[in-house]
Amino acid sequence: MMWSTDTPPKVDRPSPNGGSVPMSRGMEEAIPLRAERHRPRGFALFAKGFRPFFLLAALHAVVLLPAWILVYAGVWSVSDYLLPTAWHAHEMVFGFTVAVVAGFLLTAASNWTRRTTATGGWLAALCLAWLAGRAAPWLSGVLPPTAIAVASLAFLPLLAFAVGRVIVAARSRRNYGLVLVLAALFGAQLVTHLGQLRGAVLWQVVGPRVGVDLVVLLILVIGGRIIPLFTRNATKAEGITHAPWADRLSLAAAAAVALADLARLWPAGLPIDALVGGASAVAAVASAWRMRRWGTRHAGREPLLWVLHGAYAFVPLGFALRAVAVFTPGLREATALHALTVGAIGGLTLGMMARVSLGHTGRMLRAPAAITVAFGLMFGAALVRVAGPLVGAGVGTPSIHLAGTAWALAFLLFLVRIGPSLFRPRPDGRPG
Protein backbone atom coordinates (compact mmCIF):
# COMPACT_ATOMS: atom_id res chain seq x y z
CA MET A 1 0.00 0.00 0.00
CA MET A 2 1.39 3.41 -0.87
CA TRP A 3 0.35 4.81 2.50
CA SER A 4 1.42 1.81 4.55
CA THR A 5 3.05 2.70 7.86
CA ASP A 6 4.46 -0.78 8.37
CA THR A 7 8.02 -0.88 9.64
CA PRO A 8 10.47 -0.72 6.71
CA PRO A 9 12.72 -3.72 6.16
CA LYS A 10 15.80 -3.90 8.34
CA VAL A 11 19.23 -5.16 7.53
CA ASP A 12 22.08 -5.99 9.89
CA ARG A 13 25.54 -4.51 9.77
CA PRO A 14 28.59 -5.72 11.65
CA SER A 15 29.21 -4.15 15.03
CA PRO A 16 32.73 -3.26 16.17
CA ASN A 17 32.09 -5.45 19.21
CA GLY A 18 30.81 -8.43 17.26
CA GLY A 19 27.25 -9.38 16.45
CA SER A 20 25.17 -6.96 14.45
CA VAL A 21 23.43 -3.64 14.73
CA PRO A 22 19.84 -3.47 13.39
CA MET A 23 19.52 -0.99 10.61
CA SER A 24 16.47 0.61 8.99
CA ARG A 25 16.76 0.74 5.24
CA GLY A 26 14.91 4.04 5.39
CA MET A 27 17.29 5.89 7.68
CA GLU A 28 20.73 4.72 8.72
CA GLU A 29 21.75 4.22 12.35
CA ALA A 30 25.28 5.15 13.28
CA ILE A 31 27.85 2.64 14.48
CA PRO A 32 30.07 3.74 17.39
CA LEU A 33 33.42 4.70 15.92
CA ARG A 34 36.85 4.41 17.45
CA ALA A 35 39.00 7.50 17.30
CA GLU A 36 41.16 7.43 14.20
CA ARG A 37 44.49 9.16 13.90
CA HIS A 38 44.05 9.91 10.22
CA ARG A 39 40.55 10.93 9.23
CA PRO A 40 39.44 11.55 5.64
CA ARG A 41 39.68 15.14 4.52
CA GLY A 42 37.88 17.09 1.88
CA PHE A 43 34.69 18.98 1.13
CA ALA A 44 31.67 16.71 1.48
CA LEU A 45 28.73 19.15 1.50
CA PHE A 46 27.26 17.69 -1.70
CA ALA A 47 27.97 14.05 -0.94
CA LYS A 48 24.40 13.37 0.30
CA GLY A 49 21.11 15.24 0.17
CA PHE A 50 20.76 15.86 3.90
CA ARG A 51 24.03 17.81 4.11
CA PRO A 52 23.28 20.99 2.11
CA PHE A 53 19.53 21.02 2.69
CA PHE A 54 19.72 20.66 6.46
CA LEU A 55 22.33 23.42 6.46
CA LEU A 56 20.13 25.66 4.30
CA ALA A 57 17.05 24.91 6.41
CA ALA A 58 18.84 25.79 9.64
CA LEU A 59 20.26 29.01 8.17
CA HIS A 60 16.82 29.91 6.89
CA ALA A 61 15.27 29.25 10.31
CA VAL A 62 17.86 31.40 12.07
CA VAL A 63 17.28 34.34 9.70
CA LEU A 64 13.57 34.09 8.94
CA LEU A 65 12.02 34.21 12.41
CA PRO A 66 13.96 37.27 13.61
CA ALA A 67 13.09 38.93 10.30
CA TRP A 68 9.42 38.10 10.82
CA ILE A 69 9.53 39.50 14.37
CA LEU A 70 10.81 42.78 12.95
CA VAL A 71 8.10 42.78 10.30
CA TYR A 72 5.41 41.92 12.86
CA ALA A 73 6.63 44.75 15.09
CA GLY A 74 6.45 47.20 12.19
CA VAL A 75 10.18 47.84 12.26
CA TRP A 76 10.94 46.40 8.83
CA SER A 77 9.10 45.87 5.55
CA VAL A 78 9.28 42.78 3.38
CA SER A 79 8.99 42.37 -0.35
CA ASP A 80 5.63 43.52 -1.65
CA TYR A 81 5.29 40.46 -3.88
CA LEU A 82 3.15 38.69 -1.26
CA LEU A 83 1.20 40.02 1.69
CA PRO A 84 3.45 40.05 4.80
CA THR A 85 1.56 37.24 6.55
CA ALA A 86 1.43 35.24 3.31
CA TRP A 87 5.19 35.74 2.85
CA HIS A 88 5.84 34.45 6.37
CA ALA A 89 3.60 31.42 5.89
CA HIS A 90 4.96 30.70 2.40
CA GLU A 91 8.58 30.80 3.56
CA MET A 92 7.94 28.62 6.60
CA VAL A 93 6.18 25.94 4.54
CA PHE A 94 7.71 26.11 1.06
CA GLY A 95 11.10 27.44 2.15
CA PHE A 96 12.18 26.02 5.50
CA THR A 97 10.01 22.90 5.75
CA VAL A 98 10.44 21.85 2.14
CA ALA A 99 14.23 22.12 2.54
CA VAL A 100 14.09 19.68 5.47
CA VAL A 101 11.77 17.38 3.51
CA ALA A 102 14.21 17.53 0.59
CA GLY A 103 17.18 16.60 2.75
CA PHE A 104 15.31 13.72 4.35
CA LEU A 105 13.76 12.25 1.20
CA LEU A 106 16.87 12.56 -0.97
CA THR A 107 18.76 10.62 1.70
CA ALA A 108 16.05 8.14 2.66
CA ALA A 109 14.98 7.34 -0.91
CA SER A 110 18.58 6.50 -1.74
CA ASN A 111 18.64 4.03 1.16
CA TRP A 112 15.21 2.58 0.39
CA THR A 113 16.14 1.87 -3.23
CA ARG A 114 19.94 1.51 -3.08
CA ARG A 115 20.08 4.04 -5.92
CA THR A 116 21.56 7.52 -6.09
CA THR A 117 19.04 10.36 -5.90
CA ALA A 118 21.21 13.45 -6.27
CA THR A 119 24.85 14.13 -5.40
CA GLY A 120 27.60 16.44 -6.57
CA GLY A 121 26.65 18.92 -9.29
CA TRP A 122 23.04 17.69 -9.53
CA LEU A 123 22.57 18.21 -5.79
CA ALA A 124 24.22 21.65 -5.98
CA ALA A 125 21.81 22.57 -8.80
CA LEU A 126 18.86 21.59 -6.61
CA CYS A 127 20.20 23.82 -3.86
CA LEU A 128 20.54 26.72 -6.30
CA ALA A 129 16.93 26.20 -7.39
CA TRP A 130 15.82 26.38 -3.76
CA LEU A 131 17.90 29.52 -3.18
CA ALA A 132 16.47 31.14 -6.31
CA GLY A 133 12.99 30.64 -4.91
CA ARG A 134 14.00 32.39 -1.68
CA ALA A 135 15.66 35.31 -3.46
CA ALA A 136 13.15 35.95 -6.26
CA PRO A 137 10.45 37.76 -4.20
CA TRP A 138 13.06 40.30 -3.07
CA LEU A 139 13.63 41.25 -6.70
CA SER A 140 10.04 42.38 -7.25
CA GLY A 141 11.30 45.79 -8.34
CA VAL A 142 13.33 44.18 -11.13
CA LEU A 143 11.56 40.96 -12.11
CA PRO A 144 7.98 40.70 -13.37
CA PRO A 145 5.60 38.79 -11.06
CA THR A 146 5.40 35.83 -13.46
CA ALA A 147 9.18 35.37 -13.38
CA ILE A 148 9.17 35.47 -9.57
CA ALA A 149 6.45 32.82 -9.49
CA VAL A 150 8.33 30.56 -11.91
CA ALA A 151 11.57 30.88 -9.92
CA SER A 152 9.78 30.08 -6.68
CA LEU A 153 7.80 27.16 -8.11
CA ALA A 154 10.70 25.44 -9.88
CA PHE A 155 12.16 23.57 -6.91
CA LEU A 156 9.41 21.13 -5.94
CA PRO A 157 9.05 19.55 -9.42
CA LEU A 158 12.83 19.07 -9.54
CA LEU A 159 12.80 17.48 -6.09
CA ALA A 160 9.88 15.22 -7.02
CA PHE A 161 11.79 14.08 -10.12
CA ALA A 162 14.99 13.39 -8.17
CA VAL A 163 13.15 11.35 -5.54
CA GLY A 164 10.47 9.84 -7.76
CA ARG A 165 12.74 8.49 -10.48
CA VAL A 166 14.61 6.18 -8.09
CA ILE A 167 11.44 5.12 -6.27
CA VAL A 168 9.73 4.24 -9.55
CA ALA A 169 12.86 2.58 -11.00
CA ALA A 170 13.11 0.40 -7.89
CA ARG A 171 9.35 -0.25 -7.94
CA SER A 172 9.15 0.85 -4.31
CA ARG A 173 5.36 1.02 -4.42
CA ARG A 174 4.90 1.70 -0.73
CA ASN A 175 6.67 5.05 -1.29
CA TYR A 176 4.78 6.21 -4.38
CA GLY A 177 2.47 8.20 -2.12
CA LEU A 178 5.37 10.35 -0.93
CA VAL A 179 5.93 11.54 -4.51
CA LEU A 180 2.22 12.34 -4.76
CA VAL A 181 2.48 14.47 -1.61
CA LEU A 182 5.35 16.40 -3.19
CA ALA A 183 3.14 17.01 -6.23
CA ALA A 184 0.32 18.16 -3.96
CA LEU A 185 2.70 20.52 -2.15
CA PHE A 186 3.56 22.01 -5.53
CA GLY A 187 -0.16 22.51 -6.14
CA ALA A 188 -0.55 24.30 -2.80
CA GLN A 189 2.39 26.56 -3.60
CA LEU A 190 0.91 27.23 -7.03
CA VAL A 191 -2.30 28.37 -5.36
CA THR A 192 -0.31 30.86 -3.30
CA HIS A 193 1.37 32.41 -6.34
CA LEU A 194 -1.81 32.45 -8.38
CA GLY A 195 -3.30 34.40 -5.49
CA GLN A 196 -0.62 37.02 -5.94
CA LEU A 197 -0.94 37.12 -9.72
CA ARG A 198 -4.74 37.38 -9.50
CA GLY A 199 -4.78 39.76 -6.56
CA ALA A 200 -6.78 37.20 -4.56
CA VAL A 201 -6.00 37.45 -0.85
CA LEU A 202 -7.88 34.25 0.01
CA TRP A 203 -5.68 32.20 -2.32
CA GLN A 204 -2.55 33.54 -0.60
CA VAL A 205 -3.99 32.37 2.72
CA VAL A 206 -5.27 28.97 1.58
CA GLY A 207 -2.10 27.90 -0.28
CA PRO A 208 0.22 27.81 2.76
CA ARG A 209 -2.55 26.44 4.98
CA VAL A 210 -3.01 23.44 2.67
CA GLY A 211 0.78 23.18 2.59
CA VAL A 212 0.78 22.78 6.39
CA ASP A 213 -1.92 20.11 6.08
CA LEU A 214 0.20 18.18 3.59
CA VAL A 215 3.34 18.40 5.71
CA VAL A 216 1.36 17.06 8.68
CA LEU A 217 0.21 14.22 6.42
CA LEU A 218 3.88 13.47 5.69
CA ILE A 219 4.55 13.48 9.43
CA LEU A 220 1.78 10.94 9.96
CA VAL A 221 3.20 8.67 7.26
CA ILE A 222 6.90 8.94 8.01
CA GLY A 223 6.52 9.39 11.76
CA GLY A 224 4.41 6.26 11.88
CA ARG A 225 7.29 4.36 10.29
CA ILE A 226 10.33 5.70 12.08
CA ILE A 227 9.27 6.70 15.61
CA PRO A 228 8.23 3.20 16.77
CA LEU A 229 11.13 1.68 14.80
CA PHE A 230 13.78 3.90 16.40
CA THR A 231 12.22 3.42 19.83
CA ARG A 232 12.16 -0.36 19.52
CA ASN A 233 15.74 -0.52 18.22
CA ALA A 234 17.10 1.78 20.93
CA THR A 235 15.19 0.48 23.97
CA LYS A 236 14.59 -3.17 23.00
CA ALA A 237 11.18 -2.72 24.65
CA GLU A 238 8.50 -5.26 23.82
CA GLY A 239 5.00 -4.44 22.65
CA ILE A 240 5.97 -1.54 20.37
CA THR A 241 3.80 -1.96 17.31
CA HIS A 242 1.13 -0.34 15.14
CA ALA A 243 -2.62 0.04 15.34
CA PRO A 244 -3.45 -0.40 11.61
CA TRP A 245 -6.99 0.96 11.84
CA ALA A 246 -5.76 4.09 13.64
CA ASP A 247 -2.98 4.51 11.08
CA ARG A 248 -5.42 4.41 8.19
CA LEU A 249 -8.04 6.58 9.92
CA SER A 250 -5.55 9.27 10.91
CA LEU A 251 -4.26 9.49 7.33
CA ALA A 252 -7.75 9.61 5.86
CA ALA A 253 -8.89 12.29 8.31
CA ALA A 254 -5.75 14.40 7.73
CA ALA A 255 -6.29 14.18 3.97
CA ALA A 256 -9.90 15.25 4.50
CA VAL A 257 -8.71 18.32 6.43
CA ALA A 258 -6.44 19.27 3.52
CA LEU A 259 -9.25 18.84 0.99
CA ALA A 260 -11.65 20.85 3.15
CA ASP A 261 -9.14 23.68 3.48
CA LEU A 262 -8.62 23.65 -0.29
CA ALA A 263 -12.40 23.75 -0.78
CA ARG A 264 -12.43 27.24 0.75
CA LEU A 265 -11.51 28.48 -2.73
CA TRP A 266 -14.69 27.06 -4.25
CA PRO A 267 -17.13 26.68 -1.33
CA ALA A 268 -20.22 25.96 -3.46
CA GLY A 269 -22.41 26.19 -0.37
CA LEU A 270 -20.37 23.60 1.56
CA PRO A 271 -20.12 23.94 5.37
CA ILE A 272 -16.34 24.26 5.19
CA ASP A 273 -15.73 25.09 8.84
CA ALA A 274 -17.84 22.17 10.01
CA LEU A 275 -16.00 19.82 7.65
CA VAL A 276 -12.61 21.06 8.88
CA GLY A 277 -13.73 20.79 12.51
CA GLY A 278 -15.17 17.30 12.14
CA ALA A 279 -12.22 15.92 10.20
CA SER A 280 -9.78 17.54 12.65
CA ALA A 281 -11.56 15.93 15.60
CA VAL A 282 -11.31 12.49 14.00
CA ALA A 283 -7.65 13.08 13.11
CA ALA A 284 -6.92 14.14 16.70
CA VAL A 285 -8.37 10.96 18.17
CA ALA A 286 -6.84 8.59 15.61
CA SER A 287 -3.37 10.16 15.65
CA ALA A 288 -3.32 10.08 19.46
CA TRP A 289 -4.56 6.47 19.61
CA ARG A 290 -1.88 5.13 17.25
CA MET A 291 0.79 6.66 19.49
CA ARG A 292 -0.28 4.50 22.43
CA ARG A 293 1.68 1.55 21.00
CA TRP A 294 4.87 3.42 20.18
CA GLY A 295 6.64 2.96 23.53
CA THR A 296 6.65 6.63 24.50
CA ARG A 297 7.15 5.75 28.18
CA HIS A 298 10.48 4.13 27.27
CA ALA A 299 11.83 7.18 25.39
CA GLY A 300 12.41 9.57 28.29
CA ARG A 301 16.11 8.90 28.80
CA GLU A 302 17.25 9.55 25.25
CA PRO A 303 16.83 13.08 23.79
CA LEU A 304 16.94 11.80 20.19
CA LEU A 305 13.87 9.70 21.03
CA TRP A 306 11.84 11.93 23.32
CA VAL A 307 12.11 14.85 20.90
CA LEU A 308 10.33 12.75 18.26
CA HIS A 309 7.64 11.52 20.63
CA GLY A 310 7.12 14.98 22.11
CA ALA A 311 6.90 16.67 18.72
CA TYR A 312 4.49 14.06 17.37
CA ALA A 313 2.23 14.69 20.41
CA PHE A 314 1.62 18.17 19.01
CA VAL A 315 -0.11 16.58 16.00
CA PRO A 316 -3.20 15.36 17.91
CA LEU A 317 -3.04 18.52 20.03
CA GLY A 318 -3.02 20.72 16.93
CA PHE A 319 -5.90 18.82 15.33
CA ALA A 320 -7.88 19.01 18.58
CA LEU A 321 -7.31 22.76 18.81
CA ARG A 322 -8.39 23.19 15.18
CA ALA A 323 -11.62 21.36 15.96
CA VAL A 324 -12.19 23.50 19.05
CA ALA A 325 -11.41 26.70 17.14
CA VAL A 326 -14.17 25.92 14.65
CA PHE A 327 -16.81 25.54 17.32
CA THR A 328 -15.45 27.99 19.93
CA PRO A 329 -15.17 31.63 18.82
CA GLY A 330 -12.76 32.44 21.65
CA LEU A 331 -9.95 30.35 20.17
CA ARG A 332 -8.21 31.65 17.06
CA GLU A 333 -7.38 29.09 14.41
CA ALA A 334 -3.89 30.61 14.12
CA THR A 335 -3.18 29.31 17.62
CA ALA A 336 -4.16 25.79 16.57
CA LEU A 337 -2.09 26.02 13.40
CA HIS A 338 0.99 27.03 15.38
CA ALA A 339 0.67 23.92 17.52
CA LEU A 340 1.17 22.03 14.27
CA THR A 341 3.82 24.31 12.75
CA VAL A 342 6.02 25.13 15.76
CA GLY A 343 5.34 22.08 17.91
CA ALA A 344 4.97 19.23 15.43
CA ILE A 345 6.83 20.47 12.35
CA GLY A 346 9.48 22.43 14.26
CA GLY A 347 10.14 19.70 16.80
CA LEU A 348 10.23 16.82 14.32
CA THR A 349 12.36 18.65 11.77
CA LEU A 350 14.94 19.62 14.40
CA GLY A 351 14.92 16.13 15.90
CA MET A 352 15.31 14.39 12.55
CA MET A 353 17.93 16.87 11.33
CA ALA A 354 20.03 16.10 14.41
CA ARG A 355 19.50 12.34 14.22
CA VAL A 356 20.13 11.99 10.50
CA SER A 357 23.14 14.32 10.59
CA LEU A 358 24.77 12.40 13.43
CA GLY A 359 24.04 8.98 11.94
CA HIS A 360 24.95 9.74 8.35
CA THR A 361 28.16 11.57 9.19
CA GLY A 362 29.34 8.52 11.13
CA ARG A 363 28.88 9.90 14.64
CA MET A 364 27.30 8.11 17.57
CA LEU A 365 23.55 8.54 17.92
CA ARG A 366 23.81 10.45 21.16
CA ALA A 367 22.56 14.02 21.37
CA PRO A 368 25.27 16.51 22.42
CA ALA A 369 24.33 18.75 25.33
CA ALA A 370 23.83 21.74 23.04
CA ILE A 371 21.37 19.79 20.89
CA THR A 372 19.41 18.70 23.96
CA VAL A 373 19.15 22.38 24.92
CA ALA A 374 17.97 23.11 21.35
CA PHE A 375 15.21 20.54 21.74
CA GLY A 376 14.12 22.22 24.97
CA LEU A 377 14.10 25.62 23.29
CA MET A 378 11.93 24.28 20.48
CA PHE A 379 9.34 22.85 22.85
CA GLY A 380 9.47 26.08 24.85
CA ALA A 381 8.79 28.02 21.64
CA ALA A 382 5.80 25.79 20.85
CA LEU A 383 4.27 26.06 24.31
CA VAL A 384 4.73 29.84 24.46
CA ARG A 385 3.35 30.36 20.95
CA VAL A 386 0.27 28.24 21.67
CA ALA A 387 -0.42 29.24 25.27
CA GLY A 388 0.50 32.93 25.03
CA PRO A 389 -2.51 34.10 22.99
CA LEU A 390 -4.80 32.03 25.23
CA VAL A 391 -3.69 33.93 28.35
CA GLY A 392 -4.81 37.32 27.09
CA ALA A 393 -4.48 39.92 24.37
CA GLY A 394 -1.63 41.66 26.18
CA VAL A 395 0.47 38.50 26.15
CA GLY A 396 -0.04 37.60 22.50
CA THR A 397 2.59 39.86 20.92
CA PRO A 398 5.34 39.24 23.51
CA SER A 399 4.72 35.50 23.21
CA ILE A 400 5.24 35.70 19.44
CA HIS A 401 8.53 37.51 19.95
CA LEU A 402 9.69 35.06 22.64
CA ALA A 403 8.68 31.98 20.63
CA GLY A 404 10.39 33.26 17.49
CA THR A 405 13.57 33.98 19.40
CA ALA A 406 13.60 30.51 20.99
CA TRP A 407 13.01 28.91 17.56
CA ALA A 408 15.94 30.80 16.03
CA LEU A 409 18.24 29.96 18.95
CA ALA A 410 17.37 26.26 18.67
CA PHE A 411 18.49 26.12 15.05
CA LEU A 412 21.50 28.31 15.80
CA LEU A 413 22.65 25.65 18.28
CA PHE A 414 22.20 23.05 15.53
CA LEU A 415 24.38 25.11 13.20
CA VAL A 416 27.11 25.62 15.79
CA ARG A 417 27.21 22.05 17.11
CA ILE A 418 26.38 19.89 14.08
CA GLY A 419 26.75 22.26 11.13
CA PRO A 420 30.55 21.83 10.70
CA SER A 421 30.19 18.05 10.30
CA LEU A 422 27.97 18.60 7.27
CA PHE A 423 31.01 19.89 5.36
CA ARG A 424 33.35 17.07 6.39
CA PRO A 425 33.63 13.50 5.08
CA ARG A 426 32.58 10.64 7.31
CA PRO A 427 35.41 9.75 9.71
CA ASP A 428 35.03 6.08 8.80
CA GLY A 429 35.78 6.83 5.16
CA ARG A 430 32.44 5.55 3.86
CA PRO A 431 30.67 7.48 1.07
CA GLY A 432 27.92 9.96 1.94
Image (cartoon, helix red, strand yellow):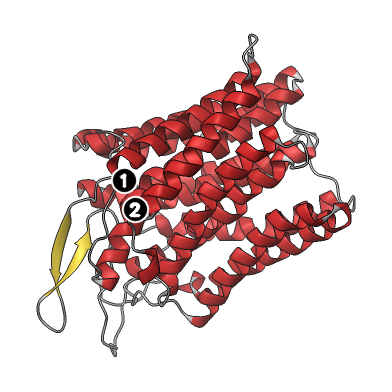
- Give the camera-side residue of 200 and 397: 397
Q: Is residue 390 left or right of residue 418?
A: right
Q: Residue at x 27, y 80 (%)?
A: 32
Distance from disc 1 to disc 2, alpha carbons, whole Å, reads 8 Å
Residue 263 percent across, percent down from the top left: 59, 19
Q: Residue at x 39, y 30 (%)?
A: 180
Residue 208 versus residue 400 in the image, above or below: above
Q: Quick one: quadrant of the C terminus? A: bottom left
Mark linked to residue 377: none
Q: Quick one: quadrant of the N terminus? A: top left
> Between disc 1 and disc 2, whose residue precedes?
2
- Give the camera-side residue of 42 and 375: 375
**Direction top: furthest residue:** 268
The reply to whether callout 1 and callout 2 are in contact (CB within 8 Å) is: yes
| Disc 2 residue crowd, few under 14, some 14–19, many 20+, Cα 10 Å | many
Q: Is residue 187 left or right of residue 332?
A: left
* Residue 391 location, quadrant: bottom right
Mark 1 vs mark 2, foreground winner is 2
Q: Would you name the residue on which mark 1 appears?
A: 117
Mark linked to residue 107: 2
Q: In terms of secondary structure, where does tag 2 sit? A: helix
Q: Residue at x 31, y 77 (%)?
A: 427
Residue 60 percent across, percent down from the top left: 62, 55
> Which amino acid, mark 1?
Thr
Residue 351 percent across, percent down from the top left: 47, 63
Residue 232 versus residue 349 in the image, above or below: below
Residue 259 versus residue 105 in the image, above or below: above
Q: In terms of secondary structure, where does tag 1 sit? A: loop
Q: Is residue 430 left or right of residue 220?
A: left
**Residue 421 seen in render:** yes
> Which amino acid, mark 2?
Thr
Q: Residue at x 39, y 64 (%)?
A: 296
